[in-house]
Amino acid sequence: MNRQKGIEGKGIEGIDAITYSTDRWDDARRFFSDWGLKSVSDEPAQQVWETLNGAQVRIRRPDDATLPPPIEAGPTLREVVWGVDDSGDLEPIAQALALTTGFEDRRGKDGTLFALDPHGLKLVFQKSVKRSVEVKGVATNPYGGVQRIDTPSPIYERATPVEVGHVVLFTDRIQEAEAFYQRLGFVTSDRYPGRGVFMRCAEQAGHHDLFLLSLPGKPSGLNHVAFTVRDIHEVFGGGLHMSRCGWKTQLGPGRHPISSAYFWYFENPCGGLIEYNADEDHLTGQWKERSFEPGPTMFAEWAIDGGIDGNTRRQRNVQASGKFLTEKK
């Protein structure tokens, strides 16, 4: 498969699906349509949405009996489905899960595994059903490395996310949670000692598929889910479209110095925040884990608080004027 995340034959390769629960049913439908996902089904008990590579976003009712108890009150994440490249990669995961206290070896007919992580979040491991996609971000022209010739960079009117990129969880048991995911084959990329752990699902993969964040007095719960788009231009195009649709920016656009990725965060009616994300670092076994002191400049090299107004294309409460940016009426 032509994937941005893990490498074939290396166990877990990325996120196949996520499930939210919310009582804001109509808001969820409008939100994910505006977000740029494709509607696959819309039933009274479940909405199913899809990224370009077939990763799914499932929306269910808060009292859905097929799901375990939520990890926090209100709309939130209820399930993460992790895909593997080959069915044979499921057996090492089953053996790792067997070392977990209280784990019951429950498998589907196709070998699919079901488990709970240390926070009580439902995890599913299956042979990936995502499809290969021929999607590329725009080439750039850094000094000394011109790649885009006689071709302007694109301007996106909205985003169409390629995949579900990563999940960020608040945790009140960071050491236990890191050890749990390491047993499953996750690799720690970088960390805030005692406060946060960036983990990728394979040795050779994007900077992180999972981030565990520990804040004093903060119980377990969802922080955000990130959706990968083609490039920085699509981050801007998607964010401006969401702004025009009336959705509230939490922070962005901006850039994370730790992963090098560009971002734009919005409030999500299905729980936590949601992120457009592009241009993250890609790591191999040669990467050496780093440690950082938490702080505003470590989270964001730069960022716009409150976002950009999708109509004026300026910061909120700033009016565009004149034919050119430097021309004032």
Image (cartoon, rainbow, N blue to C red):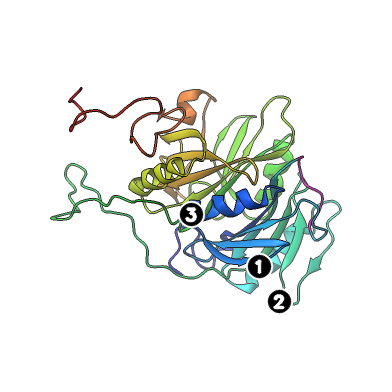
- From this view, report whether residue 290 is shown above or below residue 45: above
Q: Tell me if mark 1 has few (under 14), some (14-19) or many (20+) residues whose alpha carbon lies within 10 angstroms of its own.
A: many
Tell me the number on the disc at residue 126: 1
Q: Residue at the location (74% across, 50% down)?
A: 121
First along the sequence among labels 2 and 3: 2
Give the magenta-colored segment's residue range.
67-73
Across and down, in percent, residue 215 comes to 67, 28
- Examine the rendering and report whether any part of residue 255 can be seen: no
Q: Which residue occupies the foreground of this view, 250 or 256?
A: 250
Q: Which amino acid does label 3 sit on?
A: Ala
Q: Which of marks 1 and 3 is nearer the N terminus?
A: 1
Contact flag, marks 2 and 3 (Cβ < 8 Å)? no
Task: Tell me which amino acid carries mark 1.
Answer: Gln
Badge 1 element? strand
Measured from the top left, where is residue 34 in percent x and y? 49, 52
* Mark 2, secondary structure of its residue: loop
Q: Which of 6 and 290 is in front in this view?
A: 6
Residue 225: x percent and y percent?
57, 46
Q: Residue under label 3, please give it.
A: 205
The numbered dot on residue 110 is 2
Residue 207 drawn above or below residue 93: above
- Main SS of residues in magenta: loop
Q: Helix, strand, or loop for circle 3?
A: strand
Q: Are dots 2 and 1 in contact, CB under 8 Å?
A: yes
Magenta span includes 200: no
The number of discs equals 3
Q: How far apart are marks 1 and 3 (CA)?
A: 18 Å
Residue 69: say if magenta. Answer: yes
Q: Which amino acid does label 2 sit on?
A: Asp
Residue drawn at the location 73% of the way across and 25% of the way down: 217
